[in-house]
Amino acid sequence: EELDIIAFEEAAQVTGSAWYYLKGAATLLEQALVNYALSTALKHGYTPIATPDVVKSEYAARCGFTPRDKVVGRGPVVDHFYHLYDTSNNLVLAGTAEIPLAGMFAKRTFNERELPCRLVGIGHAFRSEAGSRGAESRGLYRVHQFTKVELFAVTEQDQGNAMMEEIRKIQTEIFEGLGFPFRVLDMPTEELGHAAYRKYDIEAWMPGRGGWGEISSTSNCLDFQARRLHIRYRSTKASASEKGLSFAYTLNGTGAAIPRLIVALLENGAQLNDANQVVGLILPSTLRRFWLGGDMLGPYARITWADPLVPE
């Protein structure tokens, strides 16, 4: 807010807490990050998809997301999604582009030669439970709405592990190009989502938090979503009793969750004067060709473009 590029108070008046306006250079930074992540995915053969932000709640449930939760016998209903009032199809705002991307293929039967199918979705994610508003969740780190680039794949069953590693490598390429410290975690079973068989989390170093903050994840859902959405493929490897049809595997990974990338870039790249005021920002030169503005970040701070460090 000091740089006049993010407005929380105005958003709180208009919408409520955990909402925000991006202004000026922050808006340009969001667009540059989207296009940078998108261009990286396109280079690896992913087809771009602009997804709808509204889905039927049944599709969210079939993908492993519970629109409402209630502890049996006690407590209120907890809404994980924003529900659209008085809609005959029980519509909700999508919590991730993974849901409409998976839903695209409901009741679809692929031929083997069509797989793997690689998509990169651009959409908005809506989270009704933005979490506690403590120090670790303040600002842009945990919000109700954000722009997100999502990697998604449908594969044959014997391609799942290789595809998970492919998605992780693309994510690593994206974050290495942004120049901030990050680490990849192979998550234990108690940290897996409802649909996931295996999951990687990627965390960036965030000085403002004094620690690591999650910026991305990758999940291999095996046939969890495919069985519920009836996504199959005709396999020459299946037994005769199965009539050549097998359930596909689905995988997803966050290419760019924009607000958290903005946090990581601002906190790691900020240049301060002796009065602890921000007077400059170092941004990775990988974003320069996607940048539409000048070299000022707010009225007093200047942007410096620098090549990201190559990891050893």
Image: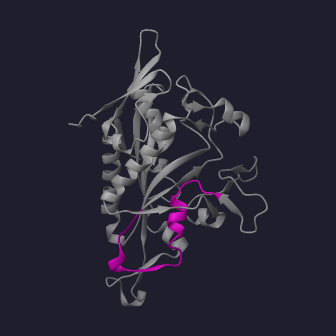
Q: Is residue 285 magenta?
A: no
Q: Nearer the viewer, residue 213 or 161?
A: 213
Q: Residue furthest right?
A: 86
Q: Which residue is drawn at the image coordinates 41% and 13% (left, top)?
A: 273
Q: Is residue 29 above or below residue 101?
A: above
Q: Position of residue 172 (x, y in %)?
A: 32, 46
Residue 298 shows in the view: yes
Q: Which residue is drawn at the image coordinates 55% and 71% (left, top)?
A: 228
Q: Position of residue 128 (x, y in %)?
A: 66, 47
Q: Which residues are magenta?
A: 93-119
Q: Residue furthest top?
A: 274
Side of 195 where 304 appears, left or right: left
Q: Is residue 108 magenta?
A: yes
Q: Which residue is drawn at the image coordinates 51% and 53% (left, top)?
A: 193
Q: Nearer the viewer, residue 81 or 246?
A: 81
How was the colour assigned to the protein in this rendering? one colour
Q: Nearer the viewer, residue 188 or 31?
A: 31
Q: Position of residue 265 (x, y in %)?
A: 41, 33
Quadrant assignment for the C terminus: top left
Q: Residue furthest front?
A: 294
Side of 228 where 169 appears, left or right: left
Q: Total label count?
A: 0
Q: Which residue is drawn at the image coordinates 48% and 34% (left, top)?
A: 25
Residue 216 shows in the view: no
Q: Nearer the viewer, residue 194 or 162?
A: 162
Q: Position of residue 16 (x, y in %)?
A: 71, 37
Quadrant assignment for the N terminus: top right
Q: Residue furthest left?
A: 312
